[in-house]
Image (spheres, rainbow, N blue to C red):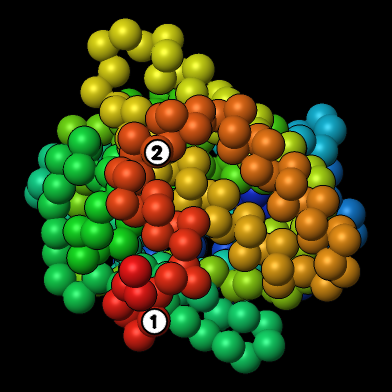
Amino acid sequence: MDISKVAVSVIIPVFNTEQYFDRTIGAVANQTLKNIEILVVNDCSLGNIESMINEYINLDSRIKYYKTPKNVGVGGARNLGLQHATGEYVMFCDSDDWLDLCTLEAMYHAGNRENADIVNCSFYRDYNNGEKKWDCYYSTDYVVNGQTALKMLAHQYDYGVELCVSTTNKIYRHQLIQNISFMENVCYEEALFNFCAIQKSAIVAFIKTGKYTYYKRLGSNLQSMTMKHIDDYNKVFSRIKVLIDMDGKSKVSKHTFIAYAEYFMNIIIEQIYESQEGEEVRKRYIMSLLKVFDSLVSLEDYIDFLGIERFRWNLQPIMMHNGERLL
């Protein structure tokens, strides 16, 4: 290993999470992979986070500090970090999360061994109400090509291996994402970033060693539901659709886009029904969401994507009993 170069740049956006920052920065700074740089981006956070960061800078020269001129959201903060990253690979770590200490080393070695553009580790959720669960668990190492990985991201087919939409349980080859940026101040910004990155990738790897733990605070932004979530879904997937249409040589099929848009629509539907809103408000959200999906995917294309039989049984679940058709 060439310790003179930066193997991985870890970008940590910070916004009002100072009570968790010690745990996060400790988990990154104490990685078994030592030739890393840690880019902390303060997104106009309140409190004394700046003094906390400066204390760590005095202890560890690998830590660099940047501050956004205004609040730009996690996407904008990551973009600022990307402007200053120098590593062979880049990782994004949220400021209330943590990763096992062997994780970066295992991911970096896998990237070099497989010549992978993107490397995924297992992704674990730790809720502040005590609930814990795996989002993505890899019991062995896998390697797939980029085209297959994109279909896995879209949940177009069941490959028996989950590819999380999160950007945080991954390292990306820096050269791959140099011209890719996050949308600012939107929800689901990771959906666009990962779509662009995976579409450009040749090899995507998954490793069994190490894991990223996502600390999920109930009541946080993605646990609430507002019309902004639906508007942002429209912005993100309209952008993906434009990117596909602009690239006449794109290998992305129409069905992959539809599968991806449908998958995220179902995520938002789940959020709507998990919210504390009344029936009328939920109905308004659902109607708005369906209108957005209709603007993204024509009915003709959607029926073609589903197939006529699947379309029928999506509309007629009442005609099923114990897994068999009644008619």
Return the mark for residue 5: none
Q: Nearer the viewer, residue 91 or 221?
A: 221
Identify which residue is drawn at 31% across, 8% down. Answer: 248
Between discs 2 and 1, the one toward the N terminus: 2
From the viewer's perspective, is residue 239 above or below residue 29? above
Identify which residue is drawn at 53% across, 49% down. Answer: 264
Question: Does 39 sit left or right of 51 as displayed?
Answer: left
Residue 5 on image: x %, y %: 30, 38
Question: Does 271 sit left or right of 255 as displayed?
Answer: right
Q: Amino acid at mark 1?
A: His
Asked which secondary structure carries label 1, the reply is: strand
Q: Nearer the viewer, residue 289 or 307?
A: 307
Q: Nearer the viewer, residue 96 or 36?
A: 96
Q: Would you identify the image quadrant in which residue 159 lies?
A: bottom left
Q: Nearer the viewer, residue 14 or 288?
A: 288
- Res. 245 visible in picture: yes
Indicate which label's residue lies in the foreground, 2 or 1. Answer: 1
Asked which secondary structure carries label 2, the reply is: helix
Identify which residue is drawn at 74% across, 46% down. Answer: 287
Identify which residue is drawn at 72% across, 62% down. Answer: 272
Residue 199 on image: x %, y %: 31, 31
Q: Amino acid at mark 2?
A: Ile
Residue 242 on image: x %, y %: 50, 17
Furthest-left residue in this view: 113
Q: Are marks 2 and 1 in contact (CB under 8 Å)?
A: no
- Check disc 2: other Cα within 10 Å, few if <14, some if 14-19, many if 20+: some
Furthest-bottom residue in this view: 130
Q: CA distance from mark 2 to mark 1?
A: 24 Å
- Res. 91 visible in picture: no
Identify residue for label 2.
303
Identify residue for label 1.
321
